[in-house]
Image: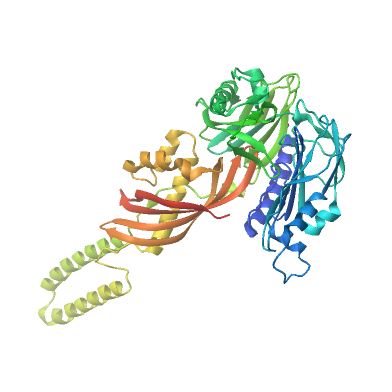
Amino acid sequence: MFSKYLRLSRYKLFLTSITVLQCFLLISAPVKADWNSGVTIEDISTRIAIDIIDDGVQVSIDLKESAVSQFFVDQAEENIVSKELDHFALKLINLQTTQLLKPTIKTASTATTKKSATFISVFFPFIEAQPKSINITPDFKSIETAGQKYIITVSHQGLPVIDHGVLTSAETLQLNWQDPWYSHFNNPKLQRSHSDPLMAFLYIEPQQIKSEVVVRIKEVARWASLDLRDDSLIFPDEFAAIKQKVAQFLLATNKVTTGSSATPILDRVDYIRMGASDIQAYQPQQAQKQVATLIGVSIIHPISEIPAKIQWEWELFNENIQRVAIRAYDPAGLFDSYVTPKYPIFEWENMLADIDLPALENKPSVMAVKVDTTQSTHRNYALLGLAGFIVFFIISYRFTPRHIRKYSHLILLLLAAAIIYGLVKTEKLSFKQSALTEQQAEPILNQLLWNVYQAFEATEEVATYDQLAYSIDGNLIETLYLQNRESFLSQDGGWSKTASIKIQNIKLISSDADNYLFDCEWLVSGEVIHWGHQHRRDNVYHATLEISPIEGDWKIIALESIGQQRVD
């Protein structure tokens, strides 16, 4: 259990880091970063992936246009001989074991011009038995001929040997063929922070808590009855049943307590693969090895507000897994901890009240959008004043001497006419029903859409419906909830947190009485969170929205989605 003082100091450290990161996000385009180390790979021109498989070593080389262009001595030249690139690929990596490994081109370059990107595959077949170790020596001088920005990753049976996967020197790799997760470099600096094939993540947000577990099929098969027909492989016709059984097992054994009596909700189940950039969901198409296949299960724990304390009691251990890393994310940042058989309870204490969190404090509120009644109020006051003036005029006319009233009341009539003319001329008074303009509609739609997105982020269904009622006509609420919730918030296999909404284009299509139909495009910026990875995401949505004043509030009475596009 963390002490209050230690936890608070860590919060301040993470808050500083997050603040600095946000500054960069605001002034630059979002970039991909490694899920654990923060290694930026978006601007890499040469990517070399080394994978040791059953019958040899596969080396895959991806060259962007900027890398291919380096092979043109004369920049005016437009054609290139692909053999030159193939020769370059053959000398990039030197591998040494107890047997001689000779490289051959498996997939040749297809680049024909300096504006081409290309992929080359080199294979080193094992002539004898699988080696117990392998020395990997990159030829950095040759690699740099394609540019200074490159990355070298190493994996065994598709599993990265280290988290961030980046090799920067000659290294010796010890190969565990029975269980490739435990293959490792001799260099102690090149170790995986998650030493076991089991990872847990906890996300704490104002309207939801989500727990995620990423685990190998091999481990789950020892804890739950998966009814696998093979001891080492899983087959395509088993994939769906395995997902269902693993999900039900982890849902039943999940012991996250939040103080809420709400029943946990199974959010999603995905097959997972680890890469240099992040952990990604995918759908396998061929038979997979149990030792190399990861599956992730995400569970939502509905809350109405962030609790004072969260506990996660962990039961899944075996003789190899004696320590499980848990990474927790909350509005102040992230921190890492772990559980063991001796100390199986992870505990999070709410210290957020002691920390300055502008992102939460300055977050726009969910509120009803009131219809502007200023003009009708002015009109009512004017009519009331006119009625009063007429009464006053009639009474005063009868009691004013005849020789005076023809002048005094003429002046009164002229003065009243001048006041009414001035109010109408300055548009402070209008006897016409004014139409809602596109400029006036923009902030109205912006707030209504913000309300919708915030409602969809709530995990308690009652809270979602209550918040939708601020912006949506009652007849549309259920339809919108069922049809659009996933499309509004689910991105790349993750759940999106909305940070801001901005109307980009708006056009009035038609209006009828108090109903207004708009063609609208809006930009949604936020974060996608999944499998221990957070990244910025911007999407543009296009739809027609019809709004109408209902009981004094603007509400959406019809919505038809036209499309959406990722723009980050």
Looking at the rendering, which quadrant does residue 268 occupy? top right
Q: Is residue 422 above or below residue 540?
A: below
Q: Tell me how many marks there are.
A: 0
Q: Is residue 410 above or below residue 231?
A: below
Picture coordinates of residue 501 (x, y %)?
50, 53
Q: Quadrant of the N terminus?
A: top right
Picture coordinates of residue 345 (x, y %)?
68, 24
Query: Left of 19 or right of it: where is 129?
Result: right
Which of the colour schemes (rainbow, by chain, secondary structure, one colour) is used? Answer: rainbow
- Which of 463 and 184 lies nearest the eye of the viewer? 184
Picture coordinates of residue 545 (x, y %)?
37, 53
- Which of 461 and 97 lies nearest the eye of the viewer? 97
Q: Quadrant of the C terminus?
A: bottom right
Q: Is residue 55 above or below residue 496?
A: above
Q: Is residue 267 visible?
A: yes
Looking at the rendering, which quadrant does residue 213 occupy? top right
Looking at the rendering, which quadrant does residue 178 occupy? top right
- Which of 264 and 195 lies nearest the eye of the viewer? 195
Q: Is residue 351 visible?
A: no
Query: Left of 480 or right of it: where is 325?
Result: right
Picture coordinates of residue 516 (x, y %)?
32, 57
Query: Left of 516 or right of it: where is 50?
Result: right
